[in-house]
Image: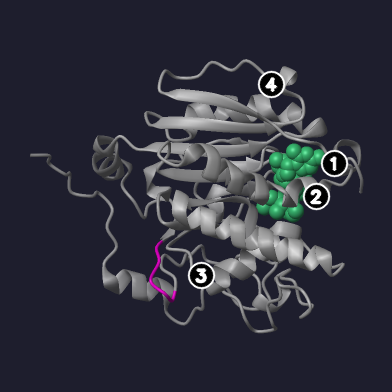
Amino acid sequence: MRTIPVPTVAYSCLEIMRKTEGMHPLLAPDNLNYAQPSITNGDIVTVTPWLAPIVWEETFDSNLMDHIYKPQNITISATVFAVGKYIRFLQDFLHTAEQHFFVGYNVNYYVFTDKPEEVPNVNLAPNRKLNVVSTPSSNRWQEISARRMELIQILIEEKLRNHADYIFCLDVDSKFHGHWGAETLGQLVAVIHPGYYYGPRSGFTYERRSKSRAYIGEGKGDFYYCGGAYGGSLKDVHALVSTCRVNFEADAAEGIEALWQEESHLNQYMWINKPTKVLSPEYLWQDFAPRRPEIKIIRFSGVVKNYAEIRPNN
Ligand SMILES: CC(=O)N[C@H]1[C@@H](OP(=O)(O)OP(=O)(O)OC[C@H]2O[C@@H](n3ccc(=O)[nH]c3=O)[C@H](O)[C@@H]2O)O[C@H](CO)[C@H](O)[C@@H]1O
Ligand SMILES: [Mn+2]
C-alpha cells in the first residue's frame, strides 16, 4: 500500500475563515491600486465563496501532491501559440518550462505556429514531447489570440482524446521562474489576473456591452481571470473553448468583438461555470509589475514586450 506523507502545511478551517473574513474574493479595500501598495498587509484569500481552493505558496505540499498524482501516470498537454514574430519567445518558454513545469511528469507540448522551421531545438526530458501544429497567420493580433480557442477545440477533438488527462493553455510571451506542478490540477482551472486581484470589481475590464455574449453586468463577476493561462481536464477545457468559440463567432457575425477578445469570453464562461480550482497571480505575473508582499514566489510571468514592434497590427 502507498503511504501518503502528512502535509507540512495545512490550513485549519479557522485560519481560512480568518483569511477570508470580511473580504469578498478580492484582497483589499476598493481604493487600492499600484500607487498605494502599503494598504495591504499581505493577507491572502485561500478559498472562493463557492469553496474552490485558491492556490498560493504555502497552501500546499508539493511532496504530497506528487504522492497522489505521480502513481497515476497522468499526461499533461500544454498548448502554446507562436505565430508571426511571437516565435522569438518560444525558446525561453520551452527552456524554462523544462525546468519548472510539471517536472517528472509526462508532458506533451503542442506548439501552434506558422513558422514550423523556426521552432527551436530545446532539449526535453525523456518523458516529454514537442508537437508542432501548422497554423495560419493573420494580419490582426486579436484574431490570432482569439482563434486559439477554436484550434485548441480541434486539437482536443482530433488528437488528445485518450492521449492526455489534463491540458493547460498558455501565452508564449512568458517564462517560468518557479515550480508549477500537480497542485494546479483540477477539472476547470483559472488564474487570477495579476493586475486586478487587489482592486475593486468595478475596475475589472469585463465586456460591459450587453450586446456581446461576453457581457458581465456591473456588480457581477467573481475574479478577473487571465486569458494567458487556464486549464483543467480535457472534457472541461473542451467545453470552455468550444463555448467561447461559438460565442466569439456569434458576436463577430454581428460585428462585435469583446474588449479583450477570448479573455472576455473566458471571464464570462468562468462566471457562469465556476472554476473548481483558482490559481493565484503567482501563476501568471507580469515582469513590469512591482512585486507585492503577498507574492512570495513568481512561477510564470509575462515578459516585457514592445507591442508595436511584434504585433502585426496595433
Ligand atoms: C497575460 C494574459 O492574460 N494575456 C492576455 C492578454 O494580452 P497579451 O498582451 O498578453 O496578449 P499577447 O500579445 O501575448 O497575445 C496572446 C497570445 O497569442 C499569441 N500570439 C499573439 C499575437 C501574435 O502575433 N502571435 C501570437 O502567437 C501568443 O501565444 C501570445 O502569447 O489579452 C489577450 C486578449 O486577446 C489574451 O487573452 C492574452 O492571453
Ligand atoms: Mn501575452
Residue at 73% x, 34% y is 135
Question: Is the residue under label 4 in contact with that under label 1 (CB below 8 Å)?
Answer: no
Judged from the image, the secondary structure of the residue bearing numbered disc 3 is loop
Judged from the image, the secondary structure of the residue bearing numbered disc 4 is loop
Type of amino acid at the residue the image marks with label 1: Ser
User: Residue 228, image x and y in percent?
Assistant: 64, 49
Number of marks: 4
In the picture of the structure, the residue carrying the numbered disc 2 is: 143
In the picture of the structure, the residue carrying the numbered disc 4 is: 119
Q: Quadrant of residue 14?
A: bottom left
Judged from the image, the secondary structure of the residue bearing numbered disc 1 is loop
Between the residue at mark 3 and the residue at mark 1, the CA separation in whole angstroms equals 31 Å
Determine which of the numbered discs, if any, sits on residue 52 in the image.
none
In the picture of the structure, the residue carrying the numbered disc 3 is: 273
Task: Report whether residue 157 is seen.
Answer: yes
Q: Earlier in the sequence, mark 4 or mark 2?
A: 4
Helix, strand or loop: magenta stretch: loop
Type of amino acid at the residue the image marks with label 4: Val
Q: Earlier in the sequence, mark 1 or mark 4?
A: 4
Q: Earlier in the sequence, mark 4 or mark 3?
A: 4
Is 54 left or right of 84, judged from the image as shown?
A: left
Q: Say few, some or many: other residues with alpha carbon within 10 Å of mark 2 (under 14 / 14 to 19 / 20 or more).
A: some
Q: Earlier in the sequence, mark 2 or mark 3?
A: 2
Give the residues drawn in magenta, as a range. Answer: 49-53
Query: Which mark's residue is nearer the viewer, 1 or 4?
Result: 1
Question: Is the residue under label 1 in contact with that under label 2 (CB below 8 Å)?
Answer: yes
Type of amino acid at the residue the image marks with label 2: Glu
In the picture of the structure, the residue carrying the numbered disc 1 is: 138
210 shown above or below 301: below
Between the residue at mark 2 and the residue at mark 1, the CA separation in whole angstroms equals 7 Å
User: Residue 244, image x and y in percent?
Assistant: 65, 61
Residue at 63% x, 56% y is 226
